[in-house]
Structures are given as C-alpha cells and as structure tokens.
Amino acid sequence: MPRFSVIVPVYKVQAYLHACLESVLGQSFTDFEMILVDDASPDACGALIDECAARDTRVKTVHLKENVGLGPARNAGMELADGDYLIFLDSDDTLTPDSLHAISDRIKETDEPDVLIYDYARTFWSGEAVRNQFASLLTEEGPAPFRLSDRPGLLRLLMVAWNKAYRRAFIEREAFAFPPGLYEDTPWTYPVLMKAGSIATLDRVCVHYLQRRRGSILRTTTRRHFEIFDQYERVFAFLDEHPELSAAWRPVLCRRMVDHLSTVFTKRDRLPRGSRAAFLREARAHYRRYRVPGPRPHSRVRTRVRYALVRLGTHRAYLTLWTALRVRSRAGRYAATARRRAKDAVLQLHYRVQLRLPLRADRAVFSSYWGRGYGCNPGALEAALREHAPHIRTAWIADPAHHHTLPTATRGLRPGTAAYWSALARSKYLVNNVNFDRRLVKRPGQVMIQTQHGTPLKLMGLDLQDRPAAARGMDFGALLRNADKWDYVLSANRHSTLVWERVYPAAYTTLEYGYPRNDIYQRASAADVARLRSSLGIPHGTVAILYAPTLRDYRHTQLCSLDLKRLLRDLGPRFVVLARAHHSYGAPLAPSSDRLIDVSDHPSVESLCLASDALVTDFSSLMFDYANLDRPVVLHATDWEAYEAARGTYFDVREFPPGAIARSADELTDIFATGHWRGSRSAQLRAAFRNRFCVYDDGRAAERVVRHVVLGETGGLPSVAPLADRQPAPAAGVADAPPSRADAARPTPRF
C-alpha cells in the first residue's frame, strides 16, 4: 500500500502534461502511485500517459470512453486508489520540489489527520509566482490536528480539492464523491471539511497553480456557469442530512455562497450576453431559500454591496450599483493622483528653496541599492566617517522597512520627504553605490562619491549599447549626465579602473584604494566568525558552502542549475549550504531545511562570506570580494555561452578562475567530496586571482577614502599592506571537516 495516491484527470492539456507528470515522478519522496485518468481527451494526452506508464511502474492509467468532466474523472481515479492518502492534481498544475516529503512529514507530526491543507502559488506566463493571499491562515495556531470549528477562517481559502491530502479511509467511510458539472469542488470541499474529525495545515507552497491565458473552462463564456446553483443545492442538501452540522455552518455557507455567486456574476467574461438577468434572479432565489434570519456580521462596503446585489436580484439594480462604484472608484483615483501631484509640486518647490540656502559642510548623506538598507561600500564608508571624521553628521536614505538596519548614530531619511530633499540640497557629501534621484541638482561645493558595488566581469555602462537584452531600454544620455555629477569613483583594482573610466567617461577622479566593504574581511576575528555562524544556525564542525548565483539578463526567473538538496545528500552531514538568491528575483532558491539555509534576505553579504568556508558561484562579482578571505572559490558554470551572448563579459573567467571549475552538478559534488576544492591546485589559482584583483583590499580602504576626500590628506595616506602580510579572518569549519568520501578512483576535476 503506497503512502499517497496522486490522482490526475487529463483532458486537452498535451502542452502542459509533461511538466505536471515530471513534477510528481521527480519527487524526492517515492512511496506513491500516480493514477492518470484520460477523460476521453481528443488530443495526444491518452498516448502520453500510456508512454509514461510504460516507463514507470508507479503509474496507472484509466481511459474513459466518453468525456465526463473533472469530478467523475476524479471518482474513476479514486476507484483504483490504494494509497493511505489521496492527493488530487490538475493536469496543467505542478507539485513543487520535495512537496510530497513535506506533506508526509507533516502528516506524521499531526497524527494522521483526516485532511491536511497545504498552500499554493499562482504561476503566470511571465514566470511570476504569487502566493495565496490567505497563506497566513495556514500558520500553526493552537493544537494540531483540530476540527474546522476550531479554525473556521480556513473557509476563506480557495475551495478546491487540489490543495489538500485526504485520508482514504475517511473518504471511503463517509462515501464522499465528486458531482458532475462545473464548480465540482464546492460540494466536495465543504462537506469534507465539516465532517473531518481532524484537520492539519502545512504552511508551505506545494502546488503551482498555472494561470493559463486560455483553456480554463471557468474562464470561458458559457451558460454552464449556471451549474453553480446545482452545486450549492448539493451543499445545503448535505447539511439537511446532517442536522448536527446545520445550525453552526448554514449561516457561514450562505455567506460563502453569496460571495461566490456575486464573483461569478461580476466576472465580465463568464456569462453570455442576455443571461445575466436570469443569473441574478436565480441567485436571489437561492439566497432567499438558504439564508438564515438574523443580523449579518459586520463587513466591508464591497461585501455589503455584493449582498445587496444578490438580495435584490435585478439587473437594473446591479447596473446602478456598478455605475456608482465605478464613479466612486474613478473619482478616488483622480483625487489620489491630484494629491500626489500637488505633494510633488510642493516638495520640489521646497527643494528649490533649500538649494538657495548655504551648504552644510558637516553633513553627509548616504544610500545604497536604491534604498534597500545599510550596507555595501556606502555602509563601510559611513562607519569610517564617524570613526575618522566624527565632526561630520551622517544621514542614510532608505525605505522605512529597512530603517532597522541603520546604526543608531545615523539619521534615517525616507525617500520623497521634505527632510530627504533638504538633505540632498544642503549636505556637502553625497555617497551612493548606484544613482540618486534623477532630479537631484549637483551644487557647487557638493562632493559626490560613487562607490560602485563590485568588480566588473559583465559589461557595464556604455558597453551595453549593443546588448539590448541586458540594457533593457537604458537611457545612455541620462547615464552620462549622472556620471557628470560624480567627483570620485572608487576602484578595487586596476581592471576596474580601466573599465570605469571607459564606460563612464566623465571628469571624476578615480580612487584606486580598494573597496571599503571588503575591509571587514581583514578586521574580523575568529570570535566574530563563530558568532556569525551561530546566528545563522550553522552546526559546529561543518563546512558551510555559500551558494550565490548572479542575475541572468535573459531570464525573468532565478536560474538554479543545482539541486541543492541532492548535493547535500551526496556530500553527507559534514556540509551545509547557505543559499542566496539574487535580489532582483525576490524569491528563494530553495526552501530552508536543517542543512539548507535560505539567506536571500540577510542584510549583509559580507557577514555571509565570513560565516562560510567556501563560495560556489557562477559569474557573480562576489568572487572578487570573497577572494580577499583567501578561502576556496568554486565556479559552477553551466551556461557560459548563453550568459556571454546576452550580457557579455570582459574576460573568460574560466581561463583565469579563482579556483576549481565544475561544469556539471556531478563534477561539483566530486570537487567537494574528494577535497579538491581546497587542494594545492585550487590554492595556486586563488593566489594568482588575488594578485590580480585584491591588491588594494588590505582592510584600510575606507580610511584612505575618508582621509583623502573629507580630511584633505593628499599625502601620507596609509600604505597598502602586501598580500603576504595580510591575515584575513579565519574560516571556522574547514579544519574540523576532512573530505567526506576521499576516493582515489575518481577523475581529477578540471580547473
């Protein structure tokens, strides 16, 4: 008896079916059967599922003689099910990686509940994934498992069958089955949840719910949408058969019905022309038949309008209400736009006044990464300014959500406020690693420091003129106007200097002093490293690998060419992975687990570098900074040709790498398993890389900048310590963790 029976009805989805099947058959949890029901699909779906069954013995197929619809097709699948739990999946949707493992673990933790509810995310053609807006209802509150009466708010979730696992014995005992017709999930889900003796939740996205442009029956214009009335009749008939449930749930379900009916009606593409008045009359009849007398709970205006729509049940009333709402909404938008424009005009007038007032020589304003928070080169410079030039008062521009990252001695500024514009107008020093607001006027006497935020491997600035995929409509004229405002540009090495001065041609002075953000690598102690590892939950004695892939200009979604959980399984318990997604994507590379720690939202990449023992990356400029730690770097480069074609690079890093190169996941595993990642050849490559790119990063870069720019010390600046004399922060885990599978028979990885 398998743990799960995954039931997938199949009808006219040949373009999406392969992804659905692979998402199930590729799960790390393998104790399941997959039942594929061909609902007399007229395309190639029947042949595709037979091919799948021939390749995998876990797959059963059923071919129905005629098209019966989603509900009866699921019933046909249930008749063949042998699993402890039933899981339904629509054939154009997919399971997320390791979701069956998570579902199984949660079922065990909650003592085999009748129903387990898990989360989903809507996925769009653009690659965007948007999590269910009511996901907070799935967090653990109170005992688990529980009954629906303990957490009735769960009924606000989408009432579908495919975001739950059902104990088969419970379903068979209660003789639950899907009805025919559209909205078949409604008379299944409500009765199942009300009758379940135990329910549990899993706060994890387990299903990607595909939002197809066309093809969904619920998005077609047809009179079949009237079948929703039959489905709610079945729901209330169930309540009549179970009077012990009726008193508690009838008012709730009546409200849910009203909301559902009004949603169908207000979707402009659902009901055919000429049928809308009839739909409203039928909705009114259902409301009067099933409503429970008494005061209705307090609700929002929109909900009250929906109730009025169904209660009145006339098309004329609907048109009146709809027109009133549209006028109100449009007037609100116009008013909001007018207020915003008026506010902007007042702020710009305020800014113009501030520009006429004297500069404040003791003020400096900092920002980093478009207001994302304290850090990078501007953060290191701000700290050095307070240390070496304490007479200068500093302020930091950041969105309010990031103000908690600011030092207490630094004033926080919210973008777009009067204080923000005053600071930009009157502060002598302006420091950023990107650009300030395009409306900023550079005053005589102001000093602008462009810190940059990495050593350029990929093409930058004017070199992107022939790279439209990477430039993405960049205004090169505005780019040059911004560069004209810079007084100083920081550089970490001679390579960067040559690139900056060519791709940002302007009259600034280049300060080849090293990057201030890298100072911490020479100043941190073993105790600092231990504290950082503890804060991240890295077990003592393990090797922590920081995995940080870079942005792909030719992709909308994060490319994760590594199965990180598989990598950890192959390497064994001595290894931990810190996974950091690029900030442009806004989604983690993989869900966190005991040895896979998502650090995408960690505010300081420098802290992550200090806490790790090795870096695995592709083409990220982080490799240049990380080399200052003199710790191993491994390149996992599987798409160099595509990256080079879309973005372009200044040199082929594979010919001058900072360490070992893995051209596949298996090679990467071998590099770590055999110890080559920290072998003598890796050390030789890293030394050559450091000699070229890390000459100036000796721990005093920020001090040199402050002394030169702010204190005016043109001579006698701290000299650069030779690489041989530096003592970067020691790694914590390497010495305690020998190779996990030293194997002389393995081929030596390529470098």
Image: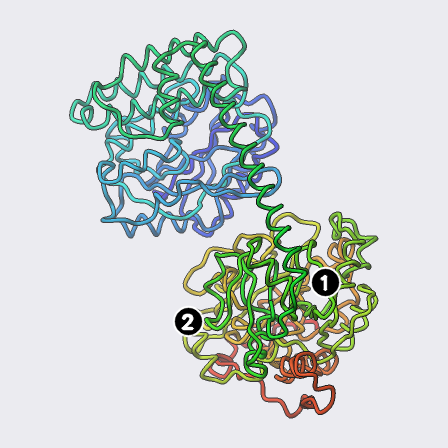
The residue where tag 2 is placed is: 535
**In the rendered image of this protein, does residue 142 appear above or below residue 648?**
above
What whole-number distance in Å separates the C-alpha atoms at marks 2 and 1? 42 Å
**In the rendered image of this protein, does residue 317 appear above or below residue 515?**
above
Placement of the N terminus among the 4 image quadrants: top left
Q: Nearer the viewer, residue 669 or 730?
A: 730
**Percent coordinates x, y for residue 706 in the rendering:** 64, 80
- Identify which amino acid the numbered label 1 is placed on: Lys
Which residue is found at the position 45% from the left and 59% from the top? Answer: 592
- Identify which amino acid the numbered label 2 is placed on: Ser
**Is mark 2 in CB contact (under 8 Å) with mark 1?**
no
Placement of the C terminus among the 4 image quadrants: bottom right
Q: Residues within 10 Å of mark 2 (few under 14, many from 20)?
A: few
As helix, strand or loop, the secondary structure at mark 2 comes to helix
As helix, strand or loop, the secondary structure at mark 1 comes to loop
Q: Nearer the viewer, residue 464 or 209?
A: 464
Which residue is found at the position 30% from the left and 37% from the top? Answer: 153
Dividing the picture into quadrants, the one containing residue 446 is bottom right
